[in-house]
Amino acid sequence: MPAAKSETETVSADVFDGYSRVRWYVCFLVFSATTINYVDRQVLGLLAPLLQKALHWSEAQYGFIIMGFSIAYAVGYVTWGRIIDVIGTKAGYGLSVLLWSVAAGLHALVGSVAGFAVARFLLGLGEAGNFPAAVKSAVEYFPSDQRAYAMGWINSGMNVAVQLTPLFIPWMVWRWGWHAAFVGTASLGLLWLIAWALFPYQRHKPKVPESQALQRIPVLLLLARRESWGLCIAKFLTDTIWWFYLYWLPKFLSAKFNLTIVQMAMPLTIIYLSASAGSVGGGVLASALIRWRNVNFGRKIAMLVCGLCALPVIFTPGVHSLGYAVGLVALAAGAHQGFSANMFVAPADIFAQSEVATVVGMTGTAGALGGVVFSVFAGEVLQHTHSYQPLFLVSGVVYLIALFAFDRLSGRLPQVAPS
């Protein structure tokens, strides 16, 4: 016999009615911001060989510039999370995009290592606000059974950016020089800001009861909750794998199959297309399962399916066919993004709306720190073993470990009735 509906269930069932067109417009805006976010951060990597020649950077100096972004991104995640919860999604998201757009344009005005390091630090600080604001937007406009689906589309923006940036940035550099690449991407953010400013976010936002919307507890008390640790541990473990795919996969394909940069374009495109499909698919699966049963069942079973789909990637180093290797990694990349889409919205299953961005910021910082740790780990493994097998083994099993930690520490997620 079904349990009586709680206040949270009533909110999800009734409050979001009538917001269909508006909510998908918000989703499109947030998807666009996420795409611009990843375009901005990729430009330096694409231009690194050219800039190192033109500005005479050493490898150590380039590493120093990259480190500035990583540190700011880790610190900025939790900072922006709290800012967005305090001042609201509309203002917080706008400030975040303004800061990273100005920082992106600043790259075109500097020429020294210190100048690029400062610009990169500011870029990381601004870009860290994207996902706390994106998740908060999804929570405020979508009922629980549709949030992972919405985040799947939003999250796919990063994969779209990975595919589009190598197509347009080289052409801009060839046509107008490297300065134009940074100015162009900064302009995208400023254009987005106009659309965001014109949208009456608060007027269209579904109204939730004050008991859910206005509670706010100190960050330290949030961090002390076991549910927060479950989310942080899961993000620490799984975000690292995406950074592994972004930074080490091209090196693996080159070493294993002797691919040139040009030959690598098609395999990487297939992998990132699969990641986009997995991002949306993970949300669709969770939404269907939540409607069928409840949030606890739907969220965790969807994550379990994604974790199982990631397992076969452990065989990648042993295959001798490029097609099989790309297929295994493509499946794993899609599984990662499906898992990630559900992890992004899981804080909304546990915490009040007024705390969601803060918790997302905390988990994002944990994920960024995990990426730093795994980068060091990967370098040491390759230095001493000259084998990618341990890295792909970790990449395959880590999702099930993360899900176990999340399940044990989060307990049963609230049963929110679908709208």
Image: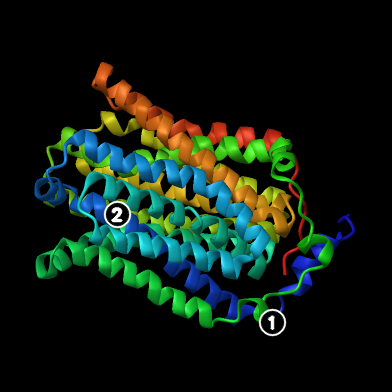
Q: Quadrant of the C terminus?
A: bottom right
Regarding residue 250, the answer to whether it shows in the image is yes
Tell me which amino acid carries mark 2. Answer: Gln
- How many C-alpha atoms fall within 10 Å of the one at disc 1: few (<14), some, or many (≥20)? few
* Disc nearer the start of the sequence (1/2): 1
Compared to 145, does 206 lie above or below? below
The percent coordinates of residue 172 (x first, y second) are 17, 68
> Label 2: which residue?
42
Front residue of this view, candidates 124 and 324: 124
> Label 1: which residue?
18
Front residue of this view, candidates 265 and 317: 265
- How many C-alpha atoms fall within 10 Å of the one at disc 2: few (<14), some, or many (≥20)? some
Q: How was this image coloured?
A: rainbow
Tell me which amino acid carries mark 1. Answer: Gly
331 sits to left or right of 234: left
Front residue of this view, candidates 165 and 181: 181
Compared to 340, does 380 lie above or below? above
* Disc 1 element: loop
Q: Quadrant of the N terminus?
A: bottom right
Q: Residue at 20%, 67% (x, y): give it.
A: 180
Regarding residue 284, the answer to whether it shows in the image is no
